[in-house]
Image (cartoon, rainbow, N blue to C red):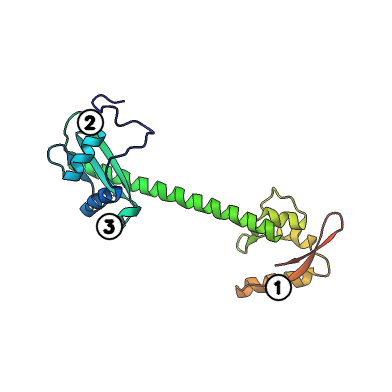
Amino acid sequence: ERPGCGGHLEAGVALDPGEDPVAMSAEVGRAGGPVQWVAGSASALGARVLERVGAQSMLVMQLGAGPDEHDRACLFAVCQCLHPRAWAAEELRLFQETGRRLVDAVTRLSVLRELRRSEAYLREAQHLSRTGSWAWSPASQAFVHWSRRRSGAVGLDQRRVGPSLEVLLQSIHPEDRATWSERVQRSIRERSDFDVEYRFVLADGAVRHCRT
């Protein structure tokens, strides 16, 4: 607890400003930049927020939404509890830059979270449908993605990213290798999709039918 804050502002504790968050975001968003609420000269809404949180001054800006998307925005704020304060131009610039970096960080985290969720859905879908996926780079002549389901289907080590093209070709049934290789090379030359059915021969001699 900081002296003069009256116990209102504590790390990790949700803060209820006692106001409609959309109305707060709308007032701040209309400013197009940081808004300074100072006791004695703040707007009616700003004065109520200051009283609610026990601050003398507050610097606040809108994050992550357009001017008409107040219901989707977040507010970033710093408070001065001991006495009224007006922030200097350089302080405002640093505050804005910090806000922009926060938006970038939150956006990256959101994208990463969505990517992980999508990957989990894909793994579940592949498990239920008994399918697998892979990606191969002609430039590096290597697999850049090889799903565990794909490895299990063809009897390869699931801990590896993917086999070399030579190892993969050797695991294909001898009668199907030429067709598989020709379809792959044609796809690379023409930059087109390919659809080919072939057989894998597992280490124990069992044969599995695949379609790529």
Q: What amino acid is found at the position of numbered circle 2 in the picture?
A: Cys
Residue under pointer 3: 67
Image quadrant occupied by the N terminus = top left
Residue 15, located in which quarter of the rendered image? Answer: top left
Question: Percent x, y for residue 125?
Answer: 64, 58
**Furthest residue toward left:** 40
How far, Cα to Cα, is label 3 from label 1?
53 Å
Which residue is rendered at x = 64% and y = 61% of the image? Answer: 136
Disc 2 is placed on an element classified as: loop
Q: Residue at x 36, y 32 (%)?
A: 11
| Residue 145 seen in this snapshot | no
Which-is-in-front pick, marks 2 and 1?
Answer: 2
Instruction: Using the image as rendered, state which of residue 94 and residue 24 is in the foreground.
Output: 24
| Apparent side of residue 155 relative to residue 58 in the rendered image (left or right) | right
Nearest the eye: 2 or 6: 6
Instruction: Kindly identify which residue carries mark 1.
Output: 183
Mark 3–mark 2 CB contact (< 8 Å): no
Query: Badge 2: few (under 14), some or many (20 or more) residues near its Cα, within 10 Å?
Result: many
Q: Earlier in the sequence, mark 3 or mark 2?
A: 3
Which quarter of the rendering shows the C terminus?
A: bottom right
| Image: 205 above or below 35 | below
The total of numbered circles placed on residues is: 3
Q: Which residue is mark 2?
A: 81
Distance of mark 3 from mark 2, alpha carbons?
29 Å
User: Looking at numbered disc 1 in the image, what kind of residue is underneath it?
Assistant: Arg
